[in-house]
Image (cartoon, grey):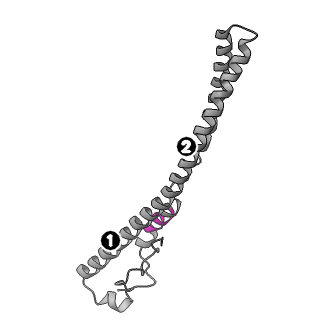
């Protein structure tokens, strides 16, 4: 998959304006040019965001599938180990107390896993490239007096 390129000049119809061209243009022509350039920039940013979301989404979907399979396998192991522990403890104490002990153990495990999940969720990075690119837009809108004089 190809990622959209950044910056002006990547659109086939785009050409940079030199000082003479700007001096000989009306305000309306200059506004149309700025509007066209901004429109092109926004389209490029949207395309970049879409491409980045697709790429990250595919990776996340694949990982989720593997985690789902691993989770089911782990669930089955935990279920049968819990039943075995419950049965083993039932040999030395009442079955109700044995079940309660197994439940408390699983409560502690769940609390630890929740804490770890919360810490990892805070590390999700989002759309890093798109965010960096969008932050450069205001710089592109600032006038550069050394390039064009009227």
Tag 1, which secondary structure?
helix
State the extent of the magenta-drawn residues as a range. Answer: 132-138
3 vs 33: above or below: above
Query: Residue beneath label 1, please?
Result: 39
Seen at 37% across and 86% down, the residue is 17
Q: Nearer the viewer, residue 20 or 48?
A: 48
Considering the numbered disc 2 on the image, is that residue within a helix, a strand or a loop? helix
Q: Is residue 93 visible?
A: yes
Foreground mark, 1 or 2, reads: 2
Residue located farthest toward the top when viewing the structure as drawn? 94
Toward which corner of the image does residue 137 lie, by quadrant?
bottom left
The residue that disc 2 covers is: 68
Q: Residues within 10 Å of mark 2 (few under 14, many from 20)?
A: few
Evaluate if marks 1 and 2 touch, with contact meaning CB atoms under 8 Å apart. no
Q: Position of residue 119 (x, y in %)?
A: 62, 40
Characterize the magenta stretch by its predominant secondary structure: helix
User: Can you tell which mark lies on residue 131?
Assistant: none
Residue 6 x, y percent position in the rendering: 46, 73
Asked whether 133 falls inside the magenta stretch, the response is yes
| Magenta segment includes 104 | no
In which quadrant is the C terminus drawn?
bottom left
Q: Is 15 positioned to the left or the right of 125 in the image?
A: left
- Horizontal placement of 146 versus 70: left or right? left
């Amino acid at each position: 998959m190809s990622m959209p390129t950044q910056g002006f000049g990547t659109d086939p119809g785009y050409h940079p304006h030199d000082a003479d061209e700007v001096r000989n243009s009306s305000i309306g022509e200059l506004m149309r040019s700025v509007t066209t350039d901004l429109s092109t920039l926004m389209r490029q940013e949207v395309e970049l965001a879409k491409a980045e979301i697709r790429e990250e989404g595919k990776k996340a979907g694949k990982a989720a599938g593997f985690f789902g399979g691993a989770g089911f396998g782990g669930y089955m192991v935990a279920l049968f180990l819990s039943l075995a522990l419950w049965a083993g403890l039932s040999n030395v104490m009442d079955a109700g107390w044995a079940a309660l002990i197994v439940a408390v153990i699983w409560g502690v495990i769940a609390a630890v896993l929740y804490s770890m999940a919360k810490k990892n969720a805070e590390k999700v990075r989002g759309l890093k490239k798109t965010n960096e690119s969008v932050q450069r837009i205001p710089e592109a809108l600032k006038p550069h007096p050394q390039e064009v004089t009227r």
